[in-house]
Amino acid sequence: MHSLNTTTTGSQDPIDPNRNPDPDQYPHRNPSHPQSRRPRGFAATAAAASMGQADSDVNNGNITGETSSGGGGGGGGKGKREREKEKERTKLRERHRRAITSRMLAGLRQYGNFPLPARADMNDVIAALAREAGWSVDADGTTYRQSHQSNHVVQFPARSIDSPLSSSTLKNCAKAALECQQQHPSLRIDDNLSPVSLDSVVIAESDHPGNGRYTGASPIPSVGCVDANQLIQDVHSTERRNDYTENFYVPVYAMLPVGVIDNFGQLVDPQGVRQELSYMKSLNVDGVVIDCWWGIVEGWNPQKYVWSGYRELFNLIRDFKLKLQVVMAFHEYGGNASGNVMISLPQWVLEIGKDNPDIFFTDREGRRSFECLNWSIDKERVLHGRTGIEVYFDFMRSFRSEFDDLFVEGLIAGIEIGLGASGELKYPSFPERMGWIYPGIGEFQCYDKYSQTSLLKEAKSRGFAFWGKGPENAGQYNSQPHETGFFQERGEYDSYYGRFFLNWYSQLLIGHAENVLSLANLAFEETKIIVKIPAIYWSYKIASHAAELTAGYYNPSNRDGYSPVFETLKKYSVTVKFVCPGPQMSSNEHEEALADPEGLSWQVVNAAWDKGLLIGGENAITCFDRGGCMRLIEMAKPRNHPDSNHFSFFTYRQPSPLVQGSTCFADLDYFIKRMHGEVIYRDKH
């Protein structure tokens, strides 16, 4: 999440959001000082002179007391320790304030439609509010009111916010103040007065109800005198008139169910697949998504690829003139899902794992996960002389060579690269076969010998060899954050060791993505590459964001953990596919799980757009009512987005074929038409 400091004083620039303030460097921000607010006016001048004299004394060596190196015997050492402790406490307080600020900025963006940048500070917020009120704000911060803008149109129409300091209230105050100045020249308002100061001036006058000097009304009604509710209605009507995002065309792909290709690489039911494709075509679906399983194609012998079943399937799709997205599925299927279909990793890989189980992810108890290969062997020659990334590259290169004609024809519109458990870029930290149940925080997966070697090497390079091990107080798969010493409020996750470990753990995830994507770009030149990002929304309302941490996303409340990931994906022009969470839980269950699906979705989607990435979506659950359908559409095509951003495609996923009984997705035909822009939604209110 975006982190920044909420405290600005006087003309002092806001604190840089990417660093922790040093209380010795900024003494006026140190809570140990008695003053709670920075002095202003003549007091500020006097304070500045006093501080200048203090600095001079320090530079000349005229310091006494416990800060002196020789005073009081051991007093200097004790004072230094106290200062270090105070520095750490100050840093924790600053992070807490930045976490609160990030939530405030999220509300302004989501509900007020303010186009604030990703790393916004309070200057950006003030500038946005000033523009909302009809002021002009130059790039250098110069703020002024242009006389010819009396009929100024709202530049950034805001949604209603139930707050006494909403943007509409500020705009009304500014308009009213301008009219008062025109009607009563004796009341002079400085053109350089900031919007915040203007607001305080107007409120100060209104605090005296008996004062009737400025109660006169203009014969021509103005926006500032309009009732606030009427103004909000006008803004909403403007939103509906300018609902341009609804017209965007978002392609819809339907995912074929797992099991159309059996474990021997053969197409199971050609006639049933043909019926399924015919039904999809009748719904005006743009294309289909099919998993290409590593455990099937290279299932029995290394570098022996069986593509015959997929060739037959792709020919059927070609007959229906549907586009095709293919998933390079380097993970198992069935371990965390119900159903009769079970697809494991290749048998020859499992045989290697019997002698060397450290090629798989391992938890603190030594239990192995067989969902995907351990990322720590990406460059270890442990797979019959090949490294992990060489195995992935050989598979992708074989696919590209086998279906070259489909690439040339343009039938294959995109390749999705599986980068972890469930094909998503994440650690296998929530395995149901290990007994995990929602909303457990999961466990770190780094206790194999390769990961431990990497961790110890990194710790030694930092000069702290004792950091070269995983945390011992992070709980079990089904623990809650407050039950652990590592994830609880002010827990060890935010200590020096915790920050070191989590940074290493997340960098292993980012490094794996970079290793595989660099080769995927070579194998699939000029083809859209897609990476799936998970929706880990439980434990999101606690500061540690424990569930995201165990999955590899270093995203506590005082740090944005998605931007570094998307920065790497941007290097390879990747399209992000976000697994959109659905309302499968009640509000009470979400509260108990500290879950915030909307907050997480907003952060991930906007972090990707801020990096200039294209983003697509996929439904996390398969059954939606009309309300759930509308929420998906709103996420894919946000109305009146200031940058006109929207999803580049959407994948509809259902476990069983659409033609076998009724679809779980109510009004699927209506949903597709909305995505295509053929039906424009109008709010009855």
Image (spheres, helix red, strand yellow):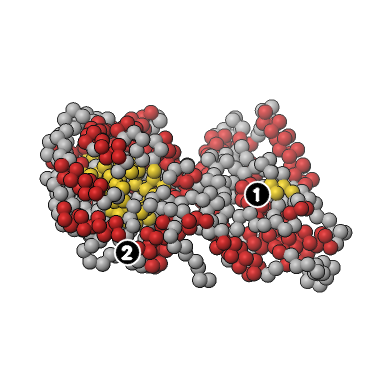
Q: Looking at the rendered structure, which numbered label has been put on residue 665?
A: 2
Q: Looking at the rendered structure, which numbered label has been put on residue 210?
A: none
Residue at 21% over, 58% down: 275
Residue picked out by circle 1: 127
Instruction: Give coordinates of residue 281: x percent, y percent.
Output: 29, 56
Could you say whether the residue bearing mark 2 is in a helix, strand or loop?
loop
Tell me the kind of residue under disc 1. Answer: Ala
Q: Nearer the viewer, mark 2 or mark 1?
A: 2
**Quarter of the figure with residue 459:** top left
Residue in the foreground of this view, choosing between 176 and 404: 404
With 14 as the anchor, is 401 left or right in this view? Answer: left
Residue in the foreground of this view, choosing between 437 and 423: 423
Residue at 29% over, 33% down: 523
Instruction: Give coordinates of residue 492: x percent, y percent.
Output: 40, 46
Judge whether 578 appears above or below 497 on screen: below
Judge whether 3 appears above or below 436 on screen: above
Other-residue count near label 1 (Cα within 10 Å), few / some / many at <14 / 14–19 / ≥20: many
Residue at 23% over, 33% down: 401
Tell me the kind of residue under disc 2. Answer: Phe
Instruction: Give coordinates of residue 140: x percent, y percent.
Output: 68, 40
With 78 as the anchor, is 510 left or right in this view? Answer: left
Judge whether 289 appears above or below 73 on screen: below
